Image (spheres, rainbow, N blue to C red):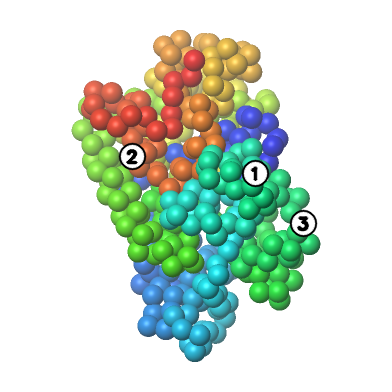
Amino acid sequence: MFVKKLTYQLYILCLSVFVISSCVENKKPIPNIAEKSELSFSQYLKIKELQTGVLIDIAHPSRENKNYKYFIAKTKSEKTPKDYVRIEKENMSFLVFSATHIGMLEKLNQVSKIKGTCSKDLIHSASVIQKIKNGEIKDFGNEGATSFEKIIELKPKLIIYSGFSGEFSKSSEFEKMNIIPIPNFDWQETHPLGKAEWILLFGYLTGTEIQAKKHFNTVKNNYLTLCKKAKEAKKAPSVLMGSKIGDYWYGPAGNSYGAKLLEDAKTNYLYKNTKGTASIEYSLEKVFSEAKNADFWINPGFPSFKLLELNFSKASYFSAFQNKQVYCYTNNPNKFWELNGVHPDWILSDLIKIFHPELKLNQSMYFYKAIE
């Protein structure tokens, strides 16, 4: 689901939690999921190829033994396994309600299969924006305002949603009409490559699994090579990540996607020892006393020093502020939201360039920029 239009700061908070994970494959066991998966890093998505078709198993991150099971048959004569929902690939079409879904479909050249999306102001893809203008793709505004009747009119085969607030509204009614809602939990992955593997879901659904595997393998190799490169750095600079929202400080917890990416970039994230995979919430006084001397400040929530100081009066007392070592992706947030799942290697490359310029990576910055 696209981030709803609440406040600019809230956008940054939401992404800070799962923006930025270690080079070690995550081995967390997921119950009742297909064995011998085509995927290696994802905790919540498993895909298994059979002679008769493809099994897709999705585990709910917070509801034990809640799994979603789908089957793509190779031929119409194949029987659907027990407890699986059958998906026919012919004339495939989607409603997609997250920026990362658009990014993955565009990477596979499957934008033509999108019938509807939401929050057009948060979209980066030029082709999707144009199709919305032409009336080829329906914009539903905020996902929470989607209309049952309008979805029925579009008659998509699949609704891909992010599951932030539980089951998709009226799921059983849609299934009776052969419109299948499928949850996507890529945002809950704690390994960057685990999130990137969700492109294989779209690959199998659109018949472009070979292209999806090729892309993922390239990203994986790039990412792991960058991990090794970062280890060559002689120092691990101290890093503060997060921003002030209201009267509290929010940043990624120690087991989160963001904290682990900082680890792979060889840094000393100041809250790396906190527990949890979501965000931490601290008083501003605590963060000021513990992190004011951090070498770098990442994702402060604002694109300029002026705006940052207006929102947080003590910001100018932080060493990173004084030394102009504050970075964010706010120069083009839509690009980041849409492509961070497709290219975690780009995020890691940016971070290594920020923290270890002495390593002299040849790549230009993809997402991040020093605030002005």
**Which SS class for mark 1?**
helix
Q: Nearer the viewer, mark 1 or mark 2?
A: 1
Q: Nearer the viewer, mark 3 or mark 1?
A: 1
Which residue has dot 2 on it? Answer: 264
Which residue has dot 1 on it? Answer: 133
Q: CA distance from mark 3 to mark 1?
A: 20 Å
> Which residue sits at x=68%, y=66%?
155
> Which residue sits at x=70%, y=74%?
177
What residue type is disc 3 on? Ser
Which residue has dot 3 on it? Answer: 147
**Which SS class for mark 3?**
loop
In the visual, does 132 lie left or right of 332? Answer: right
Q: Is residue 334 above or below residue 100?
A: above
What residue type is disc 1 on? Lys
Q: Earlier in the sequence, mark 1 or mark 2?
A: 1
Q: Is residue 299 visible?
A: no
Q: CA distance from mark 2 to mark 3?
A: 42 Å
Q: CA distance from mark 1 to mark 2?
A: 41 Å
